Image (tube, helix red, strand yellow):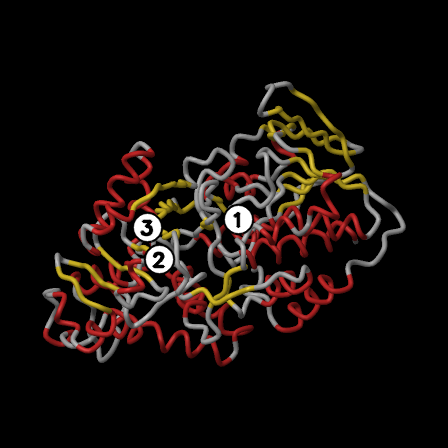
Amino acid sequence: MQKDIMYNTEMDEALKVIDKGLKKTISPKQIIVVGAGMAGLVSASLLKAAGHDVKIFEANNRVGGRIETVRMEDTGLYLDVGAMRIPYSHTLTMAYIRKFGLQVSPFINRNETDIIYVNGRKTTLKQYEKDPSILRYPVEMNEVGKTSEELLLLAVQPIINFIKKNPEKNWDIVVKDFGRYSTGQFLKYHPYQYNTYFSPVTIEMIGVLLDLEGFLERSFVETLRFLYIMQEESGFCEIVGGNDRLPKSFLPQLEENIIYNQKLMKLHQHDNGVTAFYRNEETFEYSSITGDLVIVTIPFSTMRFVEVDPFDSISHEKWKAIRELHYMPATKIGIQFKSRFWEEQGQLGGRIITDLPIRYAYYPSYGIGEKGPAMMLGSYTWSYDALLWDGLSKGDRIYYALHNLATILGGQVYDEFISGISKSWTLDPYALGGFALFQAGQESELQPAIVKPEGRIFFAGDHTTLYHGWIQGAIESGIRVAVEVNE
């Protein structure tokens, strides 16, 4: 099975590639790269520098894929509607940030002043941690007095501690032992201490307060990975000026190699190469290009609409993975306010946690203490919560997000409101989902096929790694595929 997380030796090799590049090729190839997200940009930049002829075809009119920063014309404020936080522990991502001389600032993921508004009751994280009964969840006697986090950690901390002892060896053991569980099944059927099981109310509370409701039906190992990263003491950062500055930093080297508004429609594998057929997204004209090989970095959700000829030039196992890999819906709503009125109430970065439809909101971590307008992530939802918003008009998304925020923060939100934006990754035709996430049992079943090249077709993207939903995964896969192709 593919290694779970890159280990030290592999990480060192990858960092060396970022720093020094690949070995110069003695047999240059004509390489077609599909998609100008991070995986496509990383692989193309490395292969071009190694002497190959590279062409990148991008369906959108910008680079970055699911790293997208929306900038407001009236105020100059911005919001990362895609990837928004970068763990300092993600060394490949940090290496590229350093390479391009980009500045980062801390992303404040949580604060003791975070507001919790659940079951119609409002409190702060600090008060809740002091007295968990404040939210009136009717938990069992043995669960009283413990926060949702404390309860969850009773069940998962021993496993996380076991992994930390020897990640290289122990992740594989954990995947083998727990890979068949969904998160919900694990919490329901796995005793967390002295043969004690969680009550249904506690599982509900864990889901609501720790933003794991969307994970309950997904693979428990995916949840473990998420918690493993969230526990990193080094914390998170964001790129000053917007995270899209990272993909845009590849443009000086690659701009001449990128063709925009070109959507992949069909791949034809033949004896001496691969022909890719494209549709221009503005004129709807079709064109084709032939190369020695193709690197496909688009999500499998969008790959389902690409015709491959001959059909069996891609293995049965790969088609199964393309068809079955689950994509998590994700939707964000940004609200522009006249001032940082929440800072007067002591909210300096951090978030709101609620069971209202907005679910999670994040105050901006940048510009704290500044006067003038500010941009807030008024709602960040996953899974079924995200699909609710996707069914609303753009105007109604802003209306209900404001309404929820007013319930929590007071009527001042209406006085302070300037404008709003929203982004559904499920409704984005070039993403068709937020990020890949295994269902129970899928990791050992699908992962070996996901990474495997098929003839002259190679695959990259965060969905081909085990860093689902992180920039690190896209970079890791871009390096992996560039090395495969160069050799």
Residue at image coords 85%, 55%? 24
- Who is closer to the viewer here, 487 or 58? 58
Crowding at mark 2 (Cα within 10 Å: few <14, some 14-19, many 20+): many
* Image disc number at residue 257: none
Q: In which quarter of the image is residue 92?
A: bottom right
Identity, as a three-letter code, of the amino acid under mark 2: Tyr
Which residue matches tag 2? 362
Residue on which disc 1 sits: 67
Of 257 and 228, nearer the camera is: 257
The answer for how far apart the CA atoms under marks 3 and 1 are is 19 Å
Q: Position of residue 146 (x, y in %)?
A: 20, 75
- Dot 2 or dot 3: first in sequence order is 2
Percent coordinates x, y for residue 209 in the rendering: 25, 62
Cβ–Cβ below 8 Å for labels 2 and 3? no
Q: Position of residue 291 (x, y in %)?
A: 77, 34
Identify the element where label 2 is drawn.
Answer: strand
Q: In this view, does 238 lie above or below 261?
A: below
For the residue pair 433 and 128, the one nearer the viewer reads as 128
Q: Is mark 1 on a helix, strand or loop?
A: loop
Q: How far apart are marks 2 and 3 (CA)?
A: 7 Å
Tell me what residue is drawn at x 22 percent, y 48 percent.
404
Distance of label 1 from label 2 (alpha carbons)? 18 Å
Visible residue check, residue 435: no
Q: Mark 3 points at which residue?
A: 378
Which SS class for mark 3?
A: strand
Q: State which mark lies toward you, 3 or 1.
A: 3
Quadrant occupied by the N terminus: bottom right
Dot 3 alpha-carbon crowd within 10 angstroms: few under 14, some 14 to 19, many 20 or more? many
- On screen, 272 above or below 338? above
Whether 100 is drawn above or below 152: the answer is above
